[in-house]
Image (tube, rainbow, N blue to C red):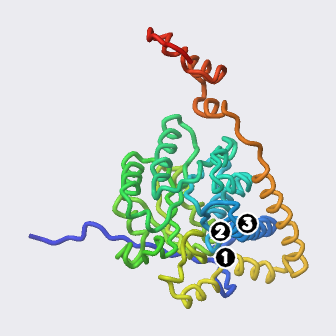
Amino acid sequence: MPRNVVHKVEIERVSILDEHGNYDAKLGDGLIGDADLVRLYEAMSSCRYLDEVAFKLQRSGRMGTYPQNMGQEAGSLGAAFILDKEDWLVTCYRENCGLFWRGVPMESILLHWMGDERGNAMPRAHFATPIAVPIGTQMLHAAGLAWASKYRGESRIACTFFGDGATSEGDFHEAANFAANLDLPVVFCCQNNFWAISTPGRIECSAPTVAQRGVAYGMPCLQVDGNDLFACVYAVKWAAQRARQECKPSFIEMVTYRLGDHTTADDARRYRDQAEVDIWKERDPLIRTRKHLEQKKLWDSSKEEAMQARVKIDVDAAVVRAEEIASPAAADLFNSMYAELPAQLAHQRDTMQTHSLASEHGVRTTGH
């Protein structure tokens, strides 16, 4: 019988601004204006300083376990910058920079890791879902949000972030299959930082690229330098246009690196070579963005010093707001549960008693 090739695939890698300061003016043309680039650099710097402060808060017992974002700021920030403000940003726990760009207050992130559920109450105006700590669950949420958008005839799309390890979870495969088969406007952004906690990427995925995992579901796939802010903007713009115009999902692999430990409860020195970390420090998204700004005469040491002073004031103020927030009221348990509270629960909230419920249902009660 004849043998025919039934499918061929190529996955492109995009890099616009590399760690040496080389800039592809053709690919980068029109992506980010000068004023916006300054603001984006300041946003990454602010997020980086919050990481430093959060680390100290945890070590001093003022906050629980915290996952630092340093080294991975460009991916979520690039997405938040290029997406429409009403597109859903569906994150895990290393996308602080994108959330802050959306307007999520810094203290919300701090409250989450302090164990205060009010940190998860993302205002609807930000179109951001709560931080997802379980690995991979948020991808299903993104598919659901995109399906709702399509059902309602809206142009809103969902962009979700997850790590390389999450692509081994069943949730990823279910979400990808669901989005591809139902033609849902989802942008799947895998932040491949080479480590699923202590499991190296070479064990997590045997394929040359993680992006190939999207091919199986018929999605167009792209790999980008995840520490290149321009490349991240380019990729999400590409995927968002397809989602909006064709109502179809795409898969982006953002190749980046976790410069710190997995969380403050981890010690990456036990399983990761320092030489590897040192190589990736030279590829830091903040360093290369600042070099580019300096080359364009948009930044200098005096501006850096002034910016760092402003950042310190902003982050320190967020810490104060988080630590000095008033204790929650008992009624919050009821008010935060339903959009419209059922009458019997409203009665419980108002009286802070439950004995009357049994009486209403014909159950004899003897006391309070």
Mark 3 secondary-structure assignment = helix
Q: Which amino acid is tagged 3?
A: Leu
Q: Residues within 10 Å of mark 2 (few under 14, many from 20)?
A: many
* Residue 251 or residue 112, whichever sits in front: 112
Image quarter of the C terminus: top right
Where's residue 29, x and y in %? 69, 71
Where's residue 321, x and y in %? 79, 52
Where's residue 226, x and y in %? 58, 72
Q: Which mark is residue 285?
A: 1
Q: Is residue 201 above or below residue 166?
A: below
Q: Residues within 10 Å of mark 3 (few under 14, many from 20)?
A: many
The alpha-carbon separation of the residues under discs 3 and 2 comes to 12 Å
Q: Which mark is residue 50?
A: 3
Q: Quick one: label 2 or label 1, which is nearer the N terminus?
A: 2
**Furthest-left residue in this view:** 1
Where's residue 91, x and y in %? 57, 56
Q: Is residue 349 above or below residue 280?
A: above
